[in-house]
Image (spheres, grey):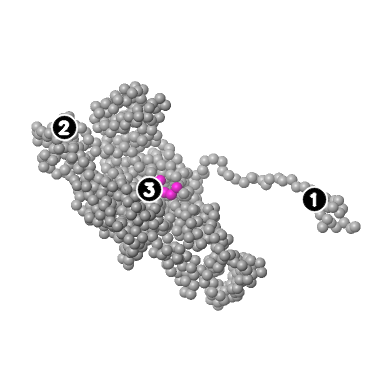
Amino acid sequence: MSEQKILAICQFGGDFMNNNDGTMTYIGGEAHVIDIDRGMHFHELVTEISDMFSCNMDLYSIKYFLRNNKRVLITISNDKDLRRMVDYNSDPTIDIFVLKKVENRIIRSVVADSGTSTDVITAVDGEVTPYNDSRLRIMNGWDNLIMGVGQAFDSSKEFREVLHKYAIAKGFVYKFIKSEGPRVTVVCSAKDCTWRIHASKSSANQDFTIKKMNHIHTCERENSKQSHRLATQSWVASVIKEKLRDTPDYKPRDIANDLEREYGLRLSYHRAWRGRAIAEKELHGSVEQAGSELPWFCEKIIETNPGSFATLQTSDDSKFISLFLSFHASINGFEHGCRPLLFLDGITLKAAKRWKLLTATAVDGENDMFPVAMAVVDAETDENWHWFLVQLKSAIGMSRTITFVSNRQNGLEGLVSQVFEDSYHVYCINNLIQEFKAEFDDSWPQELKDEMVDNLIRAVCACKIDEFNQCIEIIKAASPELAEWVMSKNPELWSDASFKGMRSGHYSSSAAQIFNEWISSRQESSVLQMIDMIRCKIMELIYKRHETSNTWTEMVLTPSRSRKVEEELSKTQNFNVICPTGSIFEVKDETTNIVNMEIWECTCRRWQVNGLPCPHALAVIERSGWCIYDFCSKYFTVDCYRQAYMLSINPIADPLHSVCAVPFRAKRLPGRPKRKPLEPRITSKRAVRCSKCRAYGHYKQTCTTAM
């Protein structure tokens, strides 16, 4: 198969504009053309673009549109993303955009004369802004927000908010002389300054109206707004709240930089951090408040996504114990589009260390992770794992014999067989390899260590017993004790040569890395935030992969499996195929293998283990003129892949706007809680003595003794 190559039109320096139909159009900038093939590495592309436009690519990202979709930009951030762009593009050319990394934001400015709000800056897809930040400040127009006597506001709160912006724009600090419900009087905090404003509720229309105002300042106002005292933590919270809702990992340093760029205010890291904390609390409330909305959240998931499972478990005193969640789209996708293979992982999330996330994930036809179910628990215990497996069985049923893959430390072997009686269980090899490396002492040379690890991995992947034994003999020649240790770890639970189930060449899971990437490590999320964030990521994942699969118009197998078949087919040129009977063939290369085309078996066992025809079977298929795709597992076909992502996850309303009366108390964190002393500390004071009468208990100024 000739290597696919496309011409990439690199566009730099322009702006995106929104069209009426929701699509985006790129305008301006400069463009250059480069060749891209599927063998190119991401760092090579970055280097070429950096040299082409003389820019620092640390400040830019690379994006492109999928075919027939001009609404969503797809990011290229690694080699796999780059290969997918090449594989899924059926045209000889493609546009890629080099965009500056700017956070998503929609900035609004209040128009003083009309009182309406108007969008003045809109960032497209979180990357570009139509206007230059240095030429446009959000504060433009704030100095005209207070216009004088007669100006009306809906409430006292609105007046205070407008006054705050007005003072920041004008560069002065004010203080309240009178701050009652219906009346507010404010003066400039500078000594002897004549600026003054008085507003109160109007008896006629109940508006809050400015009654008196002296707009003249006789003080020397601040020449710079870089350290303005009005930029309080509460004000920072009010400014960043909406952006924090859309960007949960908004960092304090980024907050400070944005406020300096957009408002001209230079804030300390601490003030930005405190402002973010206040905004976070206002958006999401405390952990207890967010937890109180979990029952409502579970009900809404089942209501908006019929067929989903959302089970909340609490104790008698209403303490949160665990939450299980599996969407109908995931259940249906696993049943009809994924192999009967599930990875069980217990994950300590960086963003919520007080909780553990138990996950069951599958793999799709492209060998990418497919989320099936998850549960939030307080600890990774046998009891919690048993509860999770029982809920998982209720969700996915037992229509197929499932192979489970888990870490050896989880102790799930007995629990899996207890809940899923007819299933298979195999170990993830990552922990096995780490334990194997721990058996080496300092006397082992590094080269010999690496060789032993390679032999262990070959023993894991060996399809036949004799191949497995050869690897063990090599380890035994170096260290009989090490070989004995390997054999004591139950090879039937980790080696393909002895394992009775089918794991299709998958030996470990990437679920822990993916879930930790999905959830910000800069915030202590509540259970509700964490689950909702994962829900949104799964929605996005399903949509993107569904759209991607629609571009595979002339393919039977998924792109990665098609390439795998082509690679295996190239090895069959010198094979000798003999057909003694109708469906049984003898294939000779360096060895002799027997291929049974009727039951899809080869004595090399690679066909049975991987689900794709081995080179010996491919040689038979090619010589016989049969169709290769008729002998591949259905789970590698494009149709099956589309079945996995056929259903979508329906959105739900903002859980923060719900009303829930169910009490919730999160489990206390380990360790001694911080508390104030029960009684105030006793302090000693020097006795007061009068210098006039020499008596104790009063001063000379308050002495009543006659002279």
Q: Residue 439: x and y, percent?
A: 39, 27
Q: Residue 514: x and y, percent?
A: 37, 46
Q: Amino acid at mark 2?
A: Asp
Residue that numbered label 2 is attached to:
589
Verify whether residue 518 appears in magenta. Answer: yes
Q: Quadrant of residue 93?
A: bottom left
Q: Residue 96: x and y, percent?
A: 31, 56
Residue that numbered label 1 is attached to:
688
The CA span between labels 2 and 3 is 51 Å
Residue situated in front as seen by the camera: 311 or 666:
666
The CA span between labels 1 and 3 is 69 Å
Q: Amino acid at mark 1?
A: Val
Q: Residue at x 28, y 41 (%)?
A: 340
Q: Residue at x 61, y 67 (%)?
A: 220
Residue situated in front as seen by the camera: 225 or 31:
31
Q: Is residue 418 above or below residue 664?
A: above
Mark 3 Cα shell of 10 Å, populated few (<14), some (14-19), many (≥20): many
SS of the residue at dot 2? loop
Residue situated in front as seen by the camera: 277 or 146:
146
Mark 2 Cα shell of 10 Å, populated few (<14), some (14-19), many (≥20): some
Please provide the residue range marked out in magenta. Answer: 515-521
Verify whether residue 34 appears in magenta. Answer: no
Labels 1 and 3: the sequence-earlier one: 3
- Examine the rendering and report whether any part of residue 655 can be seen: no
The CA span between labels 1 and 2 is 107 Å
SS of the residue at dot 3? strand
Name the quarter where the C terminus is drawn. Answer: bottom right
Labels 2 and 3: the sequence-earlier one: 3
The disc label shown at residue 325, or none = 3
SS of the residue at dot 1? loop
